[in-house]
Amino acid sequence: MITLTPDTICEEWNSHAELPTGRLTPKRRQAFGARIKDHPDIDTWVTGITNIAASAFCRGENDRGWTATPSQRSKHHG
């Protein structure tokens, strides 16, 4: 069984080559720790990150070139 930590979330994010590489800053680590308390199921995180990677909009295919980042994911989970 895999333990859900900020590191496992970052590893999952970075396993998707189509997403920008994420790294854990101290602030991001703290934010992910808080979100993990709210949503401790790793499958929920994997599904969410996979959905982001599958979204053309989240990958920057939009009129502003905006892309999803781990920082946004650490603030808003669901």
Image: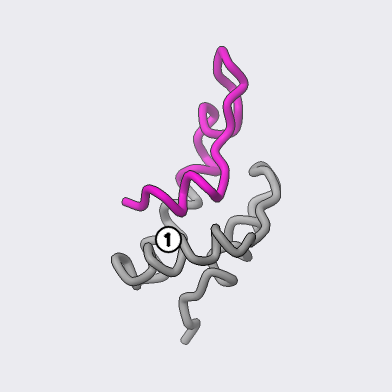
Q: Which residues are magenta?
A: 51-78
Q: Is residue 52 magenta?
A: yes
The image shows residue 70, relative to residue 43, as above or below, that is above
Residue 10 horizontal/vertical position (percent): 60, 62
The image shows residue 9, relative to residue 60, as above or below, that is below
Q: Nearer the viewer, residue 37 or 47?
A: 37
Q: Is residue 58 magenta?
A: yes
Drawn side of residue 78 relative to residue 61, left or right:
left
What residue appears at the point 50 percent right and 82 percent down from the top-left corner?
2
**SS of the residue under disc 1:** helix
Q: Nearer the viewer, residue 23 or 58?
A: 23
Q: Nearer the viewer, residue 46 or 22?
A: 22
What residue appears at the point 66 percent right and 53 percent down from the top-left corner?
22
Residue 8, image quadrant: bottom right
User: What secondary structure prevails in the magenta region?
Assistant: loop
What residue appears at the point 38 percent right and 68 percent down from the top-left corner?
36
The image shows residue 22, relative to residue 7, as above or below, that is above
Residue 59, image quadrant: top right
What residue appears at the point 64 percent right and 43 percent down from the top-left corner?
19
Structural crowding at the residue carrying mark 1, measured as other residues with C-alpha within 10 Å and reported as few (<14), some (14–19) or many (≥20): many
Drawn side of residue 78 relative to residue 19, left or right:
left
Drawn side of residue 51 relative to residue 44, left or right:
right
Q: Nearer the viewer, residue 48 or 32?
A: 32
Return the residue at label 1: 45
Instruction: Indicate the amino acid at tag 1.
Output: Trp
Residue 72 horizontal/vertical position (percent): 48, 44
Q: Residue furthest top?
A: 63
